[in-house]
Image (tube, rainbow, N blue to C red):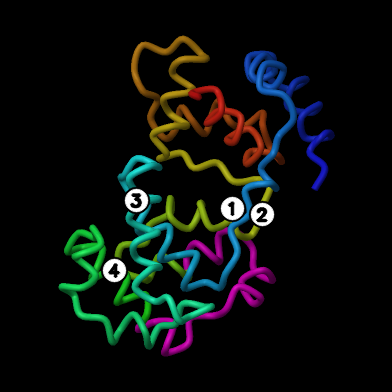
Amino acid sequence: MDYSIAQTTLKQADPILGTVIDRVGNCTLNQEPHQGELLDALARSIIYQQLSGKAAAAIHRRFLQLYPELNLLTAEAILSTSDETLRSVGLSRSKVLYIKDLAQRIQVGLPPIAHLETLDNESIIQLLTQVKGIGRWTVQMLLIFRLHRWDVLPVDDLGIRSAIRKLYGLEELPDKKTVERIGQVWKPYQTIASWYLWRSLD
């Protein structure tokens, strides 16, 4: 994927973001591939909710180690794992509930990634937020990292809000409306802008 047009457009549209793009260099979003089917992708997103990346990665690794014989995570495998076993790898009670609800919905016909790729962002959000514990933010992470949609702005993301506060000299963390207003000029490359905002915090 070539992000050069997106980078040039964003620099022209927003000089403040432009300074970040100059500092960080080329966007490498496509080098952070998340593979796997919907179950893999959403289970990972649930595990990562409200945790630091490092802690979440450790729990996610231990979770996958529960199923060493599987190349592909299955709903059946998750549903046959006791809550105690899932808790033992570091999952909270609520996350165990969410992951099992996800597995049940996969069994009864939540569409695969290939079908989701034919839908627009909002339709995917409406469909997947019916699963317990999956809100807009979680689906937006799927849209960005798994479906590679270029125009997604996760307005509730703490990293995005912190970066905007710092870069745009705001006194406090911006609310959803403020993030949307500032992000208007980043269309149709809000995903790439979001990636640069995250990098600006590194």
Q: Which mark is residue 98?
A: 4
Q: Is residue 115 magenta?
A: yes
Could you tell whether 162 is left or right of 152 in the image? Answer: left
The segment highlighted magenta reads: 104-126
Earlier-in-chain disc, 4 versus 2: 4
Looking at the image, do the residues carrying marks 2 and 1 touch, with CB atoms under 8 Å apart?
yes
Q: CA distance from mark 1 to mark 4?
A: 20 Å
* Crowdedness near tag 3: few (<14), some (14–19) or many (≥20) residues, C-alpha within 10 Å: some
Q: Choose between 69 and 2: the one closer to the eye.
A: 69
Could you tell whether 63 is left or right of 180 in the image? Answer: left
Q: CA distance from mark 2 to mark 1?
A: 6 Å
Q: CA distance from mark 4 to mark 3?
A: 11 Å
Label 3 element class: loop
Label 4 element class: helix
* Crowdedness near tag 4: few (<14), some (14–19) or many (≥20) residues, C-alpha within 10 Å: some
Q: Is residue 123 above or below residue 153?
A: below
Residue 174 locus on image (x, y percent)? 40, 25
Mark 1 — residue? 145
* Crowdedness near tag 1: few (<14), some (14–19) or many (≥20) residues, C-alpha within 10 Å: some
The amino acid beneath tag 2 is His
The amino acid beneath tag 3 is Gln
Earlier-in-chain disc, 3 versus 2: 3
Q: Which mark is residue 148?
A: 2
Looking at the image, do the residues carrying marks 1 and 3 touch, with CB atoms under 8 Å apart?
no
Residue 67 locus on image (x, y percent)? 39, 76
Earlier-in-chain disc, 1 versus 4: 4
Mark 3 — residue? 49
Identified at 30% across, 76% down, the residue is 101
Q: CA distance from mark 1 to mark 3?
A: 15 Å
The amino acid beneath tag 4 is Tyr
Q: Is residue 58 magenta?
A: no
